[in-house]
Amino acid sequence: MAVNVKTEDRPPIVETSSNHQQFTELFHLYKDRTYDFALRMLGDAHAAGDVAQDVFIRLYEHQSNHHHIEDVKSWLFIVTRNLCLNHMRNRGRQVPLDALDDQLAQTNPAVDPRQRALRRALATLESPYREALILKVYQGFAYIEIAEILGTTVPAVRAILFKARNQLRDELNRTQAKGDSYEL
Amino acid sequence: MNCEHCRQLISALVDEELTEGERGSLDEHLAQCSECAQYSEQIRELERLTSEWESSAMPRDIEQAILDRAKQKPHGWLGRVGGGSYRIPRPVAWAAVLLLALLSVNSLISRNGSTQEEQFITTPENNQPVQHIILTQADIVQTYTTGSAPADL
């Protein structure tokens, strides 16, 4: 069962007099969610680790340089998303499917064919469908928060998620048609 | 309500983002349309499947690496030189430091009167220089700002 961290309390506003302790608190509050988002976006634990490091070092620099951040949680996901998209652009937008399978095999040796099919199908989704689905299903964000992260409107988020689910369903059914695994 | 609109509402229903009015219209349509009812089941099954993918915590080594890097980073703008989000290239940073140092030295020497300008005072008759007067930068500044030469000239 997925541990969906639903929208907790609004994060504290970063005051200009931020310090190392404040950074550490924010880091421990958001490190797992940020890493998890990057991992699902990239399908590669090594790349997700690099992105997560870059995100939090940027946060630290922002605080050190007295840059005001209105909403830390949104800021973290916006930066993570942008860095993931940059990474995907550099490697040709493809999620390494072998790495996905390896990762699944490590966490769950008895690989469920439905899970393998799902991860592969999710990896075929283009931006912004993939991140919208991840932000909703795995991060538990409300539409209004997803709209802020994607830089769009709530009706657009609703439409994006509708299309994302359709694409995911179609991809899973295509996989099944090839005799690989699973049909919805 | 057409089927396209209905299916978009099904997606929003799964996300718990429907208004009461939308929910009523959706239920009404689903009761009459078997294809949309089947679609609804597929989306719910998809949701069950996706929610089985467990979350991953940040590995301990990455966590430690981030905390170590943050600890090593100096505060303030100096922390950006050669690293960080808004990177100043190292050669540019060093060139700026060198330039500032040179300007400071020059300013220091000027204050001590070592850098001076010679000015010729000429007579109207023969246009020949009659004397050399050594002007310091302070004299020149005074002349420019007050419109008159220093009293001892």
Image (tube, rainbow, N blue to C red):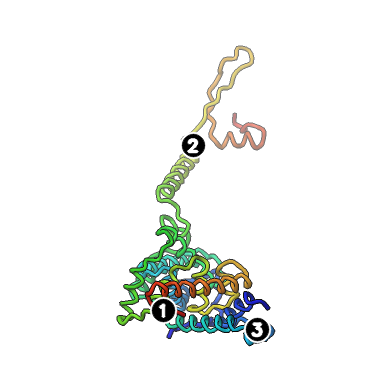
Which of disc 2 and disc 3 is earlier in sequence?
3
Instruction: Label 3, secondary structure: give it.
Output: helix
Q: Crowding at label 2, few (<14), some or many (≥20) Cα neighbours within 10 Å?
A: few
Q: What residue type is labelled 3?
A: His
Q: Crowding at label 1, few (<14), some or many (≥20) Cα neighbours within 10 Å?
A: some
Chain letter of the residue beneath label 2 in the structure image = B
Q: Residue furthest top?
A: B126
Chain letter of the residue beneath label 3 in the structure image = B
Q: Which of marks 1 and 2 is in front?
A: 1
Q: Mark 2 points at which residue?
A: B113
Q: Is residue B70 visible?
A: no
| Residue B135: image location, x then y, percent | 54, 31
Q: Residue at x 53, y 23 (%)?
A: B132
In contact (CB < 8 Å): disc 1 and disc 2: no
Q: Residue at x 60, y 12 (%)?
A: B126
In contact (CB < 8 Å): disc 3 and disc 1: no
Q: Name the residue under label 1.
A: A182
Q: What residue type is labelled 2?
A: Gly
Q: Do the residues marked 1 and 2 share a common chain?
A: no
| Residue B9: image location, x then y, percent | 62, 79
Q: Mark 3 points at which residue?
A: B29
Instruction: Label 1, secondary structure: give it.
Output: loop
